[in-house]
């Protein structure tokens, strides 16, 4: 993808992740002080829409990213350390991980406003953060509530199947590749601890802060491995 359209797509996707509001060409120019005219941005947005990266919902003047746009975004993600504030919040629950891992799952849910699933010794499954997940704007739609309720009902079976599908490095799966349904995304990993294999991750809508959440899951995964 050419530099300017790629930049416009990246800014639009990141803006929508933060605001959950369709993004218009004039808003992109004004907010990010672009050196392109709104007309130029509109032309690029039209091309991006034709290529399947964005759509224009209903009669809104703005566009929103598609699964293809999110895939374009995550292709650029590189692991970074979380902020010092986040590290301080996680320190006490990571220190006690060997005795009780549920507080760590709850801390991740609070930091991400996502569902968190955890399976220790494979058959000891736990999930938390559903109130934060259901509080996302996407779940104001009745069809989405139905989709997520089906996932919750089948969560233990889905997690059990994941043990055979993923490796021991944090990975992002979204849309048609998400084990929880095409409406969702997940960042998950397996890990080893005291001769046992566990699995944990986040469950979120397609619209989620992939970079920040990947940093978080990767940091927790590395911290657990260091305890082995």
Image: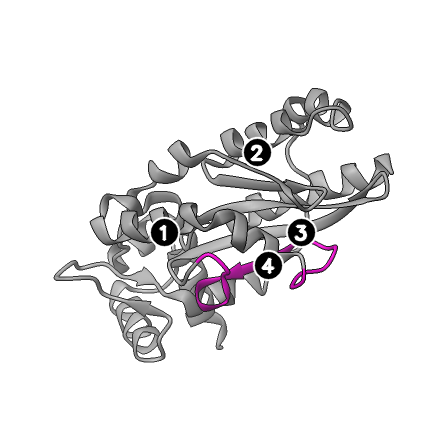
Name the residue carrying label 1: 150
Give the numbered dot on residue 215. Answer: none
Between the residue at mark 1 and the residue at mark 4, the CA separation in whole angstroms equals 16 Å
Of the 4 image quadrants, the one containing the C terminus is top right
- Which mark is drawn over residue 108? 2
User: Closer to the N terminus: mark 2 or mark 3?
Assistant: 2
Q: Distance between the residues labelled 2 and 3?
A: 14 Å
Asked if residue 208 shows in the view, the reply is no
Q: How many angstroms separate mark 1 from mark 2 (CA)?
A: 23 Å
- Count of marks, rendered view: 4
Query: Badge 3 is on which residue?
Result: 189
Distance from Cα at disc 3 to Cα at disc 1: 23 Å
Could you tell me which secondary element the residue under label 1 belongs to?
Answer: helix
Q: Which color scheme did the rendering employ for the protein?
A: one colour
Q: Is residue 35 left or right of residue 88?
A: left
Q: Point out the tag, 1 or 2, that comes first from the N-terminus.
A: 2
Identify residue for label 4. Answer: 161
Give residue 162's position: percent from left, percent from top. Answer: 61, 58
Location of residue 4 in the rendering, given as x and y in whole percent from the top left corner: 44, 70
Query: In the image, what residue occupies the spot 66% across and 26% down?
Result: 90
Q: Is residue 151 left or right of residue 226?
A: left
> Element at badge 4?
helix
């Amino acid at each position: 993808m050419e530099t300017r359209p790629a930049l416009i797509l990246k800014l639009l996707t990141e803006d929508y992740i933060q605001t959950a509001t369709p993004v218009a060409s004039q808003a992109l120019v004004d907010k990010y002080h672009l050196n392109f005219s709104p007309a130029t941005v509109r032309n690029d947005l039209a091309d991006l829409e034709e290529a399947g990266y964005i759509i224009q919902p209903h009669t809104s003047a703005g566009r929103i990213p598609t699964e293809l746009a999110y895939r374009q975004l995550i292709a650029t993600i590189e692991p970074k350390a979380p902020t010092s504030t986040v590290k301080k919040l996680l320190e006490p629950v990571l220190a006690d991980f060997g005795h009780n891992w549920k507080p760590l799952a709850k801390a991740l849910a609070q930091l991400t406003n996502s569902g968190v699933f955890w399976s220790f010794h494979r058959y000891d499954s736990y999930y938390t953060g559903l109130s934060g997940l259901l509080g996302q704007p996407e779940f104001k739609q009745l069809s989405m509530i139905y989709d997520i309720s089906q996932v919750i009902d089948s969560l233990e079976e889905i997690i059990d199947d994941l043990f055979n599908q993923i490796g021991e490095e944090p990975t992002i799966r979204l849309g048609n590749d998400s084990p929880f349904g095409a409406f969702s995304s997940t960042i998950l990993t397996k890990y080893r601890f005291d001769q046992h294999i566990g699995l944990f991750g986040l469950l979120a809508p397609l619209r989620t802060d992939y970079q920040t959440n990947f940093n978080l899951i990767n940091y927790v995964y590395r911290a657990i491995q260091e305890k082995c």
